[in-house]
Image: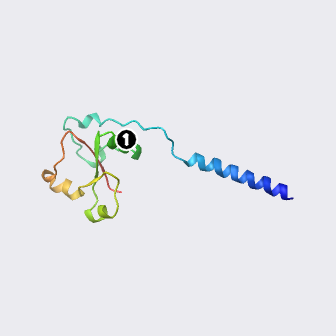
Amino acid sequence: MKLKRIIVAISILALAALACQTLLPTAEPVAAPTQPSQFQNNNAPQTEDDVPRIGVKEAKAAVDSGQAILVDVRGADIFAEQHAAGAMSIPLDIFEYDIASISLEKEQWIITYCT
């Protein structure tokens, strides 16, 4: 009976270890994506639907490689509480109503986030 319990416990531990291993992130480096070509020649998107979306891994790779800057468009108070590493704060209302006050390079790939 004791041997049966040990075998069951070992089986459960082995299954748990396998399950945990499948949840771990892969160590493969993510290649930095290139800036969407349709916006490189000042063809800025006109609507929110026109803005291309990228995943977190791609955004991080682009920022880490120096191809892009990360901009948090939430309010400054929320940014102060918590934000992505390396992000700068430019609230969305400044983008919408006072874009001239933003001193970013026009050729720079700007990746914004709000959550």
- Asked which quadrant contains residue 30, the reply is top left
Q: Which of 24 and 97 is in front in this view?
A: 24
Q: How is the image coloured?
A: rainbow
Give the side of residue 12 with respect to residue 46, left or right.
right
Where is residue 37 drawn, in percent x and y? Answer: 27, 34
The residue furthest right is: 1
Q: Nearer the viewer, residue 59 or 28?
A: 28
**What residue is disc 1 on?**
61
Viewport quadrant of the C terminus: bottom left
- Asked which quadrant contains residue 72, the reply is bottom left
- Asked which quadrant contains residue 66, the reply is top left
The residue furthest left is: 100
Viewport quadrant of the N terminus: bottom right
Q: Residue at x 60, y 50 (%)?
A: 20
Where is residue 101 drawn, in percent x and y? Answer: 13, 53
10 Å crowding of disc 1: few (<14), some (14-19), many (20+): some
Q: Residue at x 64, y 47 (%)?
A: 18
Under mark 1, the amino acid is: Ala
113 up-or-down from 62: above or below? below
